[in-house]
Image: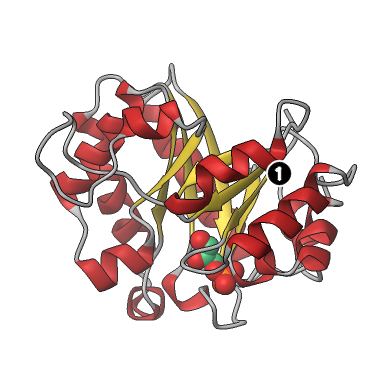
Amino acid sequence: MGKLVIANWKMNGDLNKVNSDLSYYANHPATNKSNVVLALPYLYIVWAKHILLNNSLIRIAAQDLSHYRDCGAYTGKINGSMLKDAGVNYVLVGHSERRSLLGENGQILVDKLINAFDNKLVPILCVGESIFNREAGDYLEFIEEQLSGLMQIPQLKEMIIAYEPCWAIGTGKIPTLLEIQEVADFIHSYMQKNFPYAKIAVLYGGSVTSQNAHEILAIANVNGVLVGGASLKTADFTAICENV
Ligand SMILES: O=C(CO)COP(=O)(O)O
């Protein structure tokens, strides 16, 4: 399996954009691949599957799921079984915007991950330090703490960890290649030590562009990229996908 390129549209786009961008990606050899994943707003997922039809290899991710595992009286929530039903393959969990804006952490994230595993979705857990932890030099301890909830998940099998330093998201600032490699190596060895039976991929995210994607994707232990802003422009996202 080649390296993954995952677009996180966040709360952007409309039906016109879904129609035009996905038709374009489905017909472009650089993007019509099973290692290209689009994380769309919930509302557009079923329609996106319709546009992609059966002949497209592109996979769909959701940007979140409920921490309530059963269906029921949870107004506004979306369960893992509904995502599976809609043809979703992957789901983001614990994106730093949700951690900081909505206070998501700890048990809520563990429950979301269990909801994903129980429904055969591959979760993409986002981790990453603030600028304070980076400057204080305790960023690896911080990330280890963010990973520690995984110990509560016996059904952990296949999952993706996205290293997204908060200070690199939407800022145009990006760690050096050695800094990315250090954290990717750290995450791989943590997962190998604690979950030797699991299939793990580690991604980098934060100010990935068509200019820097090539060298980031060349780092051995980086198994792909998670792209925010640059994934909203079809030419830029296609250029990033041309690197894998
Ligand atoms: O948060 C991100 C992807 O999940 C990264 O966003 P940017 O690529 O806009 O920095």
Q: Nearer the viewer, residue 189 or 62?
A: 62
Q: Few, some or many C-alpha atoms within 10 Å of disc 1 (few <14, some 14-19, many ≥20)?
A: few
Instruction: Report the amino acid beneath label 1.
Output: Ala
Measured from the top left, where is residue 208 in percent x and y? 66, 67
Position of residue 97 in the picture relative to residue 24 (left or right) = left
Q: Residue at x 47, y 32 (%)?
A: 86
**Quadrant in which residue 7 is drawn:** bottom right
Question: Residue 80, located in which quarter of the rendered image?
Answer: top left
In screen coordinates, is 73 left or right of 215?
left
Residue wearing tag 1: 220
The residue sitting at 61% across, 48% down in the picture is: 38
Quadrant assignment for the C terminus = top right
Q: Secondary structure at mark 1?
A: loop
Task: Using the image as rendered, state which of residue 192 and residue 4 is in the foreground.
Answer: 4
> Where residue 59 sits in the image (x, y, percent)?
63, 36
Count of marks placed on residues: 1
Q: Is residue 191 left or right of residue 73?
A: right
Residue 233 is situated, as x and y percent measured from the top left of the image, at 73, 69
Extreme top residue here? 197
Q: Quadrant of the N terminus?
A: top right
- Residue 225 lies, with reference to residue 128, above or below; the image says above
Compared with 59, 168 (above or below) is below
Q: Is residue 222 visible?
A: no
In the displayed image of the protein, which residue is found farthest to the right? Answer: 29
Ligand 1 shows up in which quadrant of the image? bottom right
Q: Residue at x 16, y 49 (%)?
A: 75
